[in-house]
Structures are given as C-alpha cells and as structure tokens.
Amino acid sequence: MKKIYLGIVFTVVMSLFFVGWVIDQFAESNMDEKDSESAIYDSMMMSVAHGLTHVQVSDFNQYLTKISTDTGLDFTLEQSDSIALPSSLLDKLNEQDVLSLQTEKSIFYLYKLPKYPHLLLSLTVTHDATEANSVNLVLTLALYIGISIALIAWLLPLTRRLSTLDATADAFGKGQLDSRIKPVSWSYISSLENNFNRMATQIEKLVADNKMLAGSLSHDLRTPLSCLRFGIEAAKDCESIDEQSIIFHRLDDELTRMEAMLDAFLNYASMERQGIKLNATPTNIAELVHDLKDEQQAIAGANNINIKTTCDVLHPVSLDRHWIGRALMNLISNAIDYAKSEIIIEANVHDGQLLIKVSDDGIGIDETALKSIFEPFTKGDSARDRSKNQFGLGLAIVKRVVEWHDGKVRASNLPERQGACFCLHIPTEKQKSS
C-alpha cells in the first residue's frame, strides 16, 4: 500500500509541476503579447504628444480629432488636477513616462505634455473581458485535465492488474484451481498478487490432498471392511468355539489396522494446521541424531540391522525438534523396512545448509518412483516392506515438515552400493536471514 500512496502523491505533484510549467509558458507568451501591445500604445502616445508641441493650443482638439479618426482610437486632453492619483503614479507622470491604468474592461494611458504640464494626453482602449475570462477558464480546465490525464495514466496499469486479479479470482472460485496471476515487474500490487498465488497454491494443494485422502481412505477401507463382513458371516456359521476365537482374533487385527489407518490419515490431514505453530529453538543436532538412534536401535537389532551415525555439526541449529525428529524417525523406520544389514545417518553443515542423510543398503528405489515418492499415499514396493501398517504417508510427512522449515528433501539411489538415500536440506538461521 505504501507503494500505491507514494505513486499517487508523486504523480499528482509531478503533474502539477509539469502542467503548471506549461501554463506559465503560455501565460508568459500572452503577457509578452500584451507588453508588445502596450509598447505600441506608449509609442503612439509619445508621438501624438510630440505632434501637439507643433500645434497651437487652440487647435489641440481639432488635431486630436483628426488623429482619433485616422487611428480609430480615442485621444483626449484632461486637466492634471482633474485626475486624483497616488504620489507614486504622479511621480511617474512627472518623469515624462506613459502611465497605464487597467480596469476590468479598459486600459487608460496618460501622458503629461512637457510644454503644458497642466494638460494630460489621455487614451482609452477597451478590451473584451469575456476573452480574458475565457482564457482563465481554459487555463483552469487545462490544469484539471492535465492532472486527470496524469492520474489516469498512472491508474491504468493498476486497474488492469486489479481486473486481472478479479478475473483470476472469479475463475478460481468457479473451480479452475490452477488459475494464477502471471507476475510482471511493473505491477503496483505485486505483493497482493504473490499472496493470491500463494493462497491459491495452498488451497489447490489442500483440495488435492483432501481428494486423495478421501479416495485412498475409501479404497484402503474397502478391503478390511470386506474382511470384517466375511469374518462375521463365517463366525455365525462356525460351530467350534476355537474356530470362532481364531476368526475374532483376525477381526480384532483388522480393526486395529483400520484404527491405525484412520489415525494416520487424520493426523496427516491436521498437519498443515499444526505446522503453522512451529516452535523453533536452538537444537543440538548430534544429540538429536543420537537419541533417534537409541529409540530405533532395538527394532533395527531385531531385524539384524546396525545403525551408524556421524555428525559434524558443531553449533546448535534453530529448528522445531519435535517435527524434525518425527521426520527423521519416519526416514529411519522406512530404512529399517528396506535395509539388509546397515543404516547410516550423517549430519553436517554446508553452504549455510544443514544436511541430514539417512541411507540404507537395501535394493533402492525404482527410478520411475523417485519423483512421486514424497506424494501422499504413494507406497514403495510392497515386496520389500516388512511392516503391514504402511499407508503411504511417512515420506509425505517428511516432505511437509521440511517445507515448513523452508527446506527441501531429496531421494536418490546410492551409486557406490545398493540402497536408497534420503537427504534433508534445511537452511540454518544465518542462511535464512541472508
């Protein structure tokens, strides 16, 4: 908004200066014409006065009548004491200068005859007051029109961008969720446009996630619900209590799985709201990595997997320990599912970025799945999965948490040995401020 206010003020001030300068130039030109006209009348007054010096006093009126007839001007003689003038104007008359007095409708020229100081040569020139008023009106209108044109020229790009924003918002509201405003460098409302695009992207992503959540939930619930219905029918027809117990035990497992599935889906759906409340604090990365290793070592050991850690981060890094810890826990759990014998966790700082790598010696990731592996409800090769409670949300949660920290996460296959590698890139506080 400050940019708009400054733009309006600058436009008005500069248009006032420019239009005022143009009007001043016109007024000065008009004044030059009037000065030239006044100089002509002054010269005529001096010439007529000079002619009177060669005429007898008794012939003054006849001479002036002839001059008036020839020139079409009204030359007359007045007594000096019949005209009351301020002392400053009387001094000008006494200095043998032509004195001009202007009223709304006329201009009076007076000149004291050198040989007859008691007489004043007078000339009355009438002018059209309507013309002067018209000129003033034209100049006033020119000022207002000039300012209006300048404001319109300044507001035109703004109104165009607002129209574009309105049309894009209307299209977005009608369901075209990919509608975005194309940014331009000269826009006055670039901040508003960027905020709209950011909001539209978040809404589009939220709607897509909700659609995917609903679709995946309905798909994944269909199988356990069918199993439950089949199990209940089987239990009704079963006469043996032992067989019923086995069936009920399987039904209990299916219900437990459904409960875990719903918890996972609802937890993911609520993460966007919770992510806004990040509690970033200086965190000892070596301590965080060591704690995560201790938590997962028992599960890894049960699968004959060894977890190794290396940490070269000497200073605390500002981040949300809970969420980053959860993201790393998901990566470690994922690595345990796919590793053969070893998991390596590495942490270091490079170019203002905290890098945390979690790699395993499994069979790696299919090249076609590398780009989509972080999308919600995308599951890896089920043949490699030791866990039954995988719903395709673990890596999606990792990506979301890292994005909250203005970072990125990448997945790749290790070139030197089989296995997958997940690398978190999180800007340090110094990198964020720069």
Image (cartoon, grey):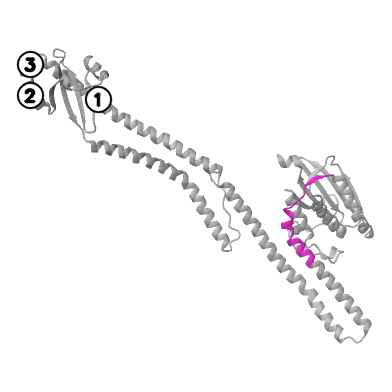
Amino acid type, mark 2: Lys
Kindly identify the residue that appears in the image at 86 percent across and 59 percent down. 338
Q: Is residue 23 left or right of residue 154?
A: left
16 relative to 58, above or below? below
Please give the label number shown on residue 36: 1
Q: Residues within 10 Å of mark 2 (few under 14, many from 20)?
A: few
State if disc 1 and disc 3 touch (CB < 8 Å): no
Q: Residues within 10 Å of mark 3 (few under 14, many from 20)?
A: few
Please count the marks in the image. Answer: 3
Taking depth in this image into account, of 392 and 187 the one nearest to the observer is: 187
As for residue 321 lying within the magenta part, the answer is no
Please name which of the two marks, 3 or 2, marks the residue nearer to the observer. Answer: 3
Amino acid type, mark 3: Val
Please name which of the two marks, 2 or 1, marks the residue nearer to the observer. Answer: 2
Please give the label number shown on residue 57: 3
Amino acid type, mark 1: Ser
As for residue 280 lying within the magenta part, the answer is yes
Question: Which callout, 3 or 2, points at the residue further toward the start of the chain?
Answer: 3
Looking at the rendered structure, the secondary structure element under dot 1 is helix
Magenta extent: 262-283
The quadrant where residue 85 appears: top left
What residue does disc 2 label?
66
- Where residue 276 appears, as percent x and y from the top left, is 72, 53
- Where residue 139 appears, as percent x and y from the top left, is 33, 37
State if disc 2 and disc 3 touch (CB < 8 Å): no
232 relative to 359, above or below? below
Question: Which callout, 3 or 1, points at the residue further toward the start of the chain?
Answer: 1
Looking at the rendered structure, the secondary structure element under dot 2 is helix
Question: Which callout, 2 or 1, points at the residue further toward the start of the chain?
Answer: 1
Spatial CA distance of label 3 from label 2 is 15 Å
Residue 387 visible, this orientation: yes
